[in-house]
Amino acid sequence: MTIIQSFALLLVWAALLAYAAYRGYKIFITLLVRALRWVPHRATSPTPFGARFASGILRSFSLDDDKFFCADGAPEEIAKKRRAGMDNLARSFDEQFAASQKASETVLDGISDLRFTDTNRVPFPFQKLVRERLNVATLALSSEGPHIVDLDGNRSLDVSGSYGVNVCGYDNYKRWMEAGWRRTKDLGPVLGPLHPIVGENLAMIKAVSKLDEVSFHMSGTEAIMCAVRLAAFNTRRKLVVTFAGAYHGWWDGVQPGPGNERKITDVLPLKDMSPASLNAIRARKDEIACVIVNPLQGFNPNSPPPNDLVLMTAAIRKAADSATLDHYAVWLKELRKVCTECEVPLMFDEVYTGFRMAPGGAQQYYGVHADMVVYGKTLGGGMPCGVVCGKRELMRRFDPERPLRVSYVIGTFAAHPLTMGAMNEFLRWVTTPEAEQVYEKIGKQFEHWIKDVNDEMKAENLPLSVHNLTTVWTVIFNQPGRYHWMFQYYLRDEGIALSWVGTGRLLVSLDFVENDFELLKKKLVNAAKRMRDDGWWYLGTPDKPITAQSISAAMGKEMAYNTVMKTVREGLLAEVLCLPEQHGPRAPKAVPPETLQEFYEEVMRRKEDDHAASHSNTVNQFMHLISSTIFIINYYTIWSNCTATMATGLFSLFLRQSGHAIFEPPCHDEEELLLGFNTRSKCFVVAGYTLAPLISLLRLSNDVGFFLALASIARSWLGVTLFFVLGHTGLLWMQYGFRISMVWLIKLVTDPFTDVLVYYPSAVTVWTTKDWQTATWDNFLSHLRGEPKDDGAKSAEEKKTQ
């Protein structure tokens, strides 16, 4: 085996040297540098891209009444208990919230925000029945301490925190808003001139943030947009580093996950608490405009904000323990050190954590100071606001050396007098020693409450626990189950006010007193008991237990089956062929001949464009003729002799690419427009084919013979081939739609046949033309010099249009 490994290494190095020779050393070095630049991407978090890919493929479906109550495999007797529990909840909701429900219906139909939140409370297979039976009211009349009063007079204990705004208690904000109005009402809504109170706010914010300058905005998202733009402007770089599934507002510039139709090329999501992430920042420091951290990620590292919408099984939601939180604090300090070394601005998104984790926010809590800090929510004292703080050199909006180079970031309602008044009242309180004492007192009370609740849950044998980071907390479910999301409805019925994310992210405010904590514990335990008694946490039988594996298998089967069946029913072929929409359950499924013809013409047109872009040289055509002939034979031999097929196939691929590299001038722009493998993706292909045999050989035992080793290498090469072809097809599906991806795949598979039909005359030309060697050498030299080709091919603009 040692001899085989040595031979393999020599073979790899020989291939690399040959690659360098036929591509030219300059091109080879360029590709090597590009490949090395992408090595740190092992630090890239798969969460945003995986979720975005899944969102483009997964189709919606709803469980019917029968399957709804036994989706985890529960028997009929348990399903009956669940139906009865749902009926009781529905009756209670209708009785308690009658007026609120009726008023909600009038606004639900016209406010798109409410329609979004109303359809995103539970996992999508269960949404239809839940929305029909359990109407969650969205209107309220007043607040009294930590309680919210609705139209029916119900007082609910609020743990939603108004999406993070309510840090100090509603009564405090009402007082600050009123005092702020009194101090600024004489100016009214005058914008442009600043009220003198702005100067006081500026001084206090600079003292809290420990930064040089401040910019006022009207929301946290708007402030994030400003901060990122200023960082990019002043560093002259465009890459923004984020972490895992961290949320930074709804702006698509920092939201690489699902729901963003923009092609994200300037956001690099890395993994929390990973040394590889630090190495990635070091490797790409010259491209990075800023590194954005949401300090709340320490509570659920490498995960998006917890939400009952995705609570399909207990394993989806996790919370960090004290050891992980300590590790996160250490890692933040390491990140701060790396950003300083690399001269990359570190930005804290404290829209949510600012003034919640401590009076000085996450900077004070973790002992780490950023170069830019973004605040929002509670800082407005109850009024809408967003604030960017930063070092002077990062906050500049103009270039003193280039008068026309400016970053135009400004807002009409920035520093609105009423917002400035309420903000001033809040800042004057939060910067006092009294505020520090309140934070410390509530912190101790809440830690004690967390322990008490978990002890009682354990004593009652209830499968959940609560975990917190300062006054932010979440509910963790400690056994497998598909119905954990139902807990939010039992909590609402008990009189606990939640946001639309349910039990994922909960808050307590600084005005909670001992009675409020005791009441909250009582309601939590009661809700959990009722849910248990109604059968939602059924664990199965000893011979057929409900496990995480059985739930995952059932969900996977449901989603795969419904996605495939719905795609077929609604006409996936029609999507590929651009069929007109057909309505009705008995709509004809036959494919009209003209649409088949259009699809065929699209494939052939792309073949023609490909030929015009990079197949004009006769010798290259002849080499394609040879390689295509071998590929056609390989389509047959792959079923009987994988080793021979992959050996001849890779030789053909090498021959094919050599024809492009040596005999055709560079055409990178055309490759990009024709949706094929570009220079960067070819680096990955070369690396994959190079590393696959080495990994395969290292996994084999020492007594494996030569031919068995070759067979293993062939299988690894086949796997690499399928991975890159299907992976590229999937990427095209995400970016351009299913039809375009199928056009590319069918073109790729049928290229050998059209090459043979079109290029067979080149065999005669190659052997009868005397001066083809001179033309070939000229092409090779122009390729090394990077000269563009001029062969009358279609312009880039034409291809974009097509």
Image: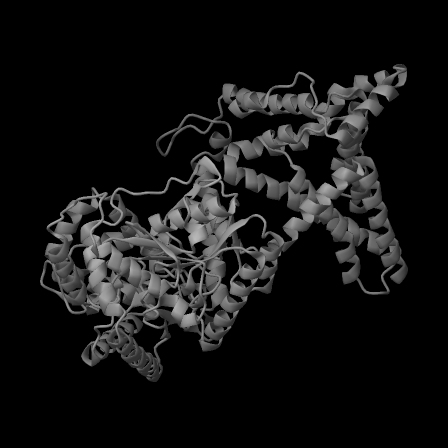
Q: Is residue 136 above or below residue 615?
A: below
Q: Is residue 15 above or below residue 473?
A: above
Q: Is residue 750 visible?
A: yes
Residue 411, position as x, y percentages in the image: 29, 43
State the residue in front, 327 or 547.
327
Please identify the quarter of the rendering in which residue 465 is found.
Answer: bottom left
Residue 37, position as x, y percentages in the image: 65, 49
**At 17% across and 62% down in the image, what residue appears?**
176
Most extreme residue toward the front is 401
**At 62% across and 31% down in the image, what residue appears?**
746
Residue 636, position as x, y percentages in the image: 76, 36
Residue 370, position as x, y percentages in the image: 45, 61
Image position of 238 (left or right of 654): left
**At 34% across and 71% down in the image, what residue appears?**
358
Please identify the quarter of the rendering in which residue 85 is found.
Answer: bottom left
State the residue in front, 42 or 7.
42
Q: Is residue 221 above or below residue 479?
A: above
Q: How many marks?
A: 0
Please identify the quarter of the rendering in which residue 154 is found.
Answer: bottom left
Image position of 593 (left or right of 606): left
Image position of 525 (left or right of 174): right
State the residue in front, 623 or 320.
320
Position of the N terminus by quadrant: bottom right
Q: Is residue 76 visible?
A: no
Q: How is the image coloured?
A: one colour
State the residue in front, 203 or 794.
203
